[in-house]
Amino acid sequence: MAIARLEIFARRRQRIAAAPFSEFSIFQVRAGRKRMGDGRRQDEIPTGGFAAVAPGQLLHVENLPPDDGAYRAVCLCLPQAMLDPADLAPADASPWAALPALRALEQAFAHVEQGVSEQLPENLLRHRVAELVAAVALAGYRPPMQRDRGLGERIRLLLNTQPAREWRAEEVAGQLALSTATLRRRLAEETTSFRGILEEVRLTHGLALVQGSHKPLKQVAAECGYASPSRFAARFRERFGTLPSELRD
């Protein structure tokens, strides 16, 4: 049960359409500004500020460098299983929030970062996550409790374990003790499809690798299940409104 830590660095303004957040994500902007919104509301997070996003959100994101340097931010992605239900708000609570740079929040964030870097045992990391969640609540935000997961979300979690694998609907249906026809019908009722979920999983994984690693884009494409880097780039642009190379310096 790993906590992901992503470093985001940009010398040019980045715009990402409908960026997915699959886990409770907490950002600290260390240089520049971040804007995030859903078309109805937009928040701006200045240098030193924080943002918290509940799992399951699709937000438009802009990363804006300062006039004299590069945009820098760190994101911690906290697995749902590490959250205490007592710390969650009702399911209809705000899906995200911009937070002030409280000293307690800065310290708790750094505490989790240090624990991830040192690869502390999970039981110790849980204590640090609890401290961070408490500091986020002190700053004025509690993530909403997730509603019951549908079939699509269960499939998404399974595919996330190996995004590059050549998954087949028949195989996944068997693992979930369903017939292939039932799987397809129930996904249609959720207005999605197996191929759509698979591509969403792969492109979301690609976005994390493009922003949070220095791997060559050819390797990123392969790790996301695309034999052709150009095909990956084209699908990436269709999904996020920008090319992978435009998120790299």
Image (cartoon, rainbow, N blue to C red):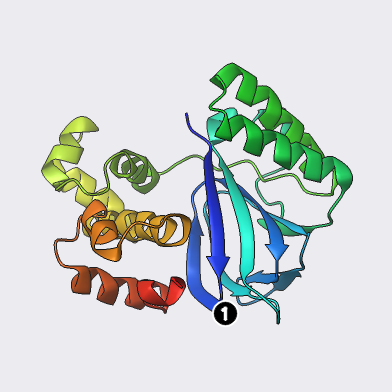
Residue at point 54%, 45% (across, down): 5
Secondary structure of residue under mark 1: loop
- Quadrant of res 97: bottom right
199 lies above or below 54: below
167 left or right, relative to 28 = left
How far across and how far down the image is residue 246, in percent?
42, 77
Q: Amino acid at mark 1?
A: Arg
51 left or right, relative to 147 = right
Residue at point 76%, 37% (across, down): 108
- Quadrant of res 143: top right
How far across and how far down the image is residue 146, in percent?
57, 42
- Residue beneath label 1, please? 13
Residue at point 29%, 64% (across, down): 217
How far across and how far down the image is residue 50, in percent?
74, 56
242 lies above or below 31: below
Asked whether residue 177 is in view, the answer is: no
Residue at point 49%, 49% (across, down): 22
> Quick one: which residue is furthest to the bottom in this view?
67
Question: Between 31 and 146, which is closer to the camera in this rendering?
Answer: 31
- Badge 1: residue crowd in 10 Å (few <14, some 14–19, many ≥20): some
173 left or right, relative to 65 = left
